[in-house]
Image (cartoon, rainbow, N blue to C red):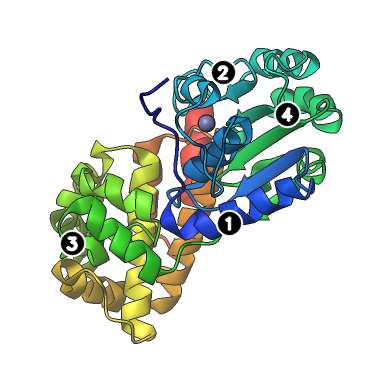
């Protein structure tokens, strides 16, 4: 085969980590089940795929798959018989118990090519309780020369019995001095990189997504609308409509990003990386105050965890309650509870 297959390379900040795993493999110290955690958008999928493709490659070199051998072509096209991918059938949907059973069957077969067998479960927290329970036996006895690699944005949502059967590795947020050069390269325009990285909470791949996200393009007007209503305690219902246009998790991330930036620039002496919204963030900090902003951040995190775990609150009510809280109209509000109760009752 002369053509090169599109095998996965890790992000630059994960090269060292991948070499480390390659070394452990050579010393036969790689576990049979690995749980790879870390924030969304830092490149976990890339390093996971790079590791599995490297394991299957027939002529790996320098800790990377060669991209030329039969195994690499099969891996890249998703048709390697010793490589099982367990992902939701549709993005954002749960991984079902039937899918986990198919993985169990895969683990019981012998390797078709006589080499290792690998499975990728991603995102692992998409498995519901039944699916996780169905995976336990396979995690305990995955068969010889098999690696089960679980990738999770929130390993804390997995059953303790799943976590305890895996070797756990949490990847940190990459340092800005590694992330920024890569991001500038991706964008082909250096100027916007710091603002995007800051809005993405430091996660470089999320920053690339933000470049094309409608809310980021409109962030100044969205934030001004929000701050205007907090200052005037004006018509909340109208003010939340523009915020509801996109996906709920993205909105929660955006609100959280603004909250952190407002707190940092006002009370930790760190100027906002996003000059376009710096003045509006200052107004947000002044009108909400430090304590309320801290509590607001806490509520956003709770809402995000609940949503990822499958909660389905009425989003308009939830966002309204969040804004009411931030405006100080209802200091005892519990936005998530309000929205969830309302949904349950309707
Ligand atoms: Zn290869």
> Could you say which disc has been placed on residue 17 in the image?
1
Q: Front-most of 258 and 57? A: 57
Q: Residues within 10 Å of mark 2 (few under 14, many from 20)?
A: many
Element type at mark 4 = helix
> Could you say which disc has been placed on residue 192 in the image?
3
92 vs 271: above or below: above
What separation in Å lies between label 3 and label 1 (alpha carbons)? Answer: 28 Å
Task: Pick whichever of labels 4 and 3 is earlier in the sequence.
Answer: 4
Task: Pick whichever of labels 4 and 2 is earlier in the sequence.
Answer: 2
State which mark lies toward you, 4 or 1: 1
What separation in Å lies between label 1 and label 2 (alpha carbons)? Answer: 25 Å
Task: Pick whichever of labels 4 and 1 is earlier in the sequence.
Answer: 1
In the rendering, at what x and y percent does residue 328 appear? 36, 66
Q: Which residue is mark 2?
A: 80
What separation in Å lies between label 4 and label 2 (alpha carbons)? Answer: 25 Å
Element type at mark 2 = loop
What separation in Å lies between label 4 and label 1 (alpha carbons)? Answer: 27 Å
State which mark lies toward you, 3 or 1: 1
Residue 235 appears anywhere in the view = no
Q: Is residue 33 left or right of residue 40?
A: right
What separation in Å lies between label 2 and label 3 (alpha carbons)? Answer: 40 Å
Q: Front-most of 28 and 245? A: 28
In the rendering, at what x and y percent does residue 166 appear? 77, 43
Residue 270 appears anywhere in the view = yes
State which mark lies toward you, 4 or 3: 3
Task: Pick whichever of labels 1 and 2 is earlier in the sequence.
Answer: 1
Q: Which residue is mark 4?
A: 132
State which mark lies toward you, 2 or 3: 2
């Amino acid at each position: 085969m002369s053509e090169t297959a599109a095998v996965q390379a890790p992000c630059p900040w994960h090269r060292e980590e991948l070499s480390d795993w390659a070394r452990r493999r050579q010393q036969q110290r790689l576990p049979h089940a690995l749980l790879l955690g870390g924030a969304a958008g830092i490149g976990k999928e890339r390093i996971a795929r790079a590791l599995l493709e490297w394991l299957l490659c027939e002529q790996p070199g320098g800790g990377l798959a060669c991209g030329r051998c039969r195994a690499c072509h099969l891996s890249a096209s998703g048709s390697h018989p010793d490589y099982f991918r367990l992902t939701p059938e549709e993005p954002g949907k749960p991984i079902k118990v039937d899918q986990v059973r198919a993985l169990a069957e895969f683990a019981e077969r012998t390797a078709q090519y006589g080499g290792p067998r690998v499975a990728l479960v991603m995102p692992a927290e998409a498995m519901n309780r039944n699916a996780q329970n169905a995976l336990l036996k396979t995690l305990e006895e995955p068969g010889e020369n098999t690696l089960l690699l679980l990738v999770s944005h929130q390993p804390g949502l997995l059953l303790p019995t799943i976590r305890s059967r895996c070797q756990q590795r949490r990847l940190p947020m990459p340092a800005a001095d590694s992330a920024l050069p890569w991001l500038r390269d991706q964008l082909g325009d250096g100027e916007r990189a710091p603002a995007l990285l800051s809005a993405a909470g430091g996660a470089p791949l999320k920053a690339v997504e933000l470049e094309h996200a409608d809310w980021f393009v409109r962030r100044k007007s969205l934030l001004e609308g929000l701050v205007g209503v907090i200052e005037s305690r004006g018509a909340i219902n109208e003010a939340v409509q523009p915020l509801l246009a996109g996906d709920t998790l993205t909105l929660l991330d955006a609100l959280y990003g603004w909250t952190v930036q407002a707190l940092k620039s006002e009370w930790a002496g760190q100027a906002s990386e996003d000059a376009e919204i710096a003045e509006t963030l200052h107004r947000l900090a002044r009108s909400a105050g430090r304590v309320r902003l801290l509590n607001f951040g806490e509520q956003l995190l709770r809402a995000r965890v609940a949503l990822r775990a499958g909660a389905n609150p009425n989003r308009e009510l939830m966002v309204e309650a969040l804004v009411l809280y931030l405006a100080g109209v209802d200091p005892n509000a519990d936005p998530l509870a309000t929205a969830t109760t309302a949904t349950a009752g309707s």
